[in-house]
Image: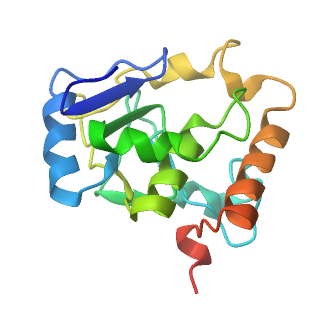
Amino acid sequence: MCTSTYLLMLDDDIIPCKDWLRICIAKCNEYDAVISCTGRIIPLNDMYPETIKDSNYKDLLIGDCFNDEAFNYCKNDTQVDFGCNSYFIKRLWLHEFWSIAPYTFESGEDIHLSASLMIKMKIPTIVPKQLSRYDSGNLVKEYGKDEFASWTKPGFFEIRKGIFENFINQMGWQPLKWKK
């Protein structure tokens, strides 16, 4: 049903800066990529990449964790395995997103979007540089940490493990650190 050139999908707890659309359009065209305000890089052979194991994991959670800023912060444009919280894409990519059936509708649209577009079209996911409230994709990251956040629900990480296993083992997705 979408007829626009671009599509921005936001989680219900995300408040982007007023220039976020402009930033997304520019970065999407520059990289021919999904643009997300945060993202994750999956460590080699780790089917629970969102579970923090040691201090090295802070470098794999891009944009929203392990900094003192109240807003999303990212030092450089960074390619990630999958975006989180918001997703800016070209409308023409929607068909490829839906060409792979979701593993589940409970969680994982973020993984599904990035993985399916990488598998089908080699489209990367980028978290753009965000250095201030004026270029941040999420001005109040604390909203994502309340009792309504999906990651706080029982079984969340197990469901996502199944999603990772499905895309990696069944669909041939190769996360960045897994590439041969």
Asked whether 117 or 42 is in front, the reply is 117
Q: Which quadrant would residue 79 be assigned to in this image?
A: bottom left
In the rendered image, the residue lying farthest to the bottom is: 180
Horizontally, residue 21 falls left or right of residue 102, namely: left
Horizontally, residue 120 falls left or right of residue 37, namely: right
- Residue 70 showing in the rendered view: yes
Asked whether 157 or 33 is in front, the reply is 33
Horizontally, residue 91 falls left or right of residue 111, namely: left
Scheme by which the image is coloured: rainbow
Q: Residue at x 56, y 80 (%)?
A: 179
- Residue 37 showing in the rendered view: no
Check the image and report above or below for 150 versus 28: above
Horizontally, residue 125 falls left or right of residue 136, namely: right
Q: How many marks?
A: 0
Q: Which quadrant would residue 109 be assigned to in this image?
A: top right
Q: Residue at x 57, y 74 (%)?
A: 177
Asked whether 93 or 165 is in front, the reply is 93
Q: Residue at x 52, y 21 (%)?
A: 142
Return the x and y of residue 150 as percentages of the image width and height.
Answer: 69, 23
Return the x and y of residue 117 as percentages of the image width and height.
Answer: 45, 53
Check the image and report above or below for 136 versus 60: above
Return the x and y of residue 153 as percentages of the image width and height.
Answer: 79, 23
Return the x and y of residue 92 as percentages of the image width and height.
Answer: 29, 42
Check the image and report above or below for 55 versus 74: below
Q: Which quadrant would residue 32 be assigned to in this image?
A: bottom left
Check the image and report above or below for 75 versus 12: below
Quadrant position of the C terminus in the picture:
bottom right
Quadrant position of the N terminus in the picture:
top left
Q: Residue at x 25, y 43 (%)?
A: 131
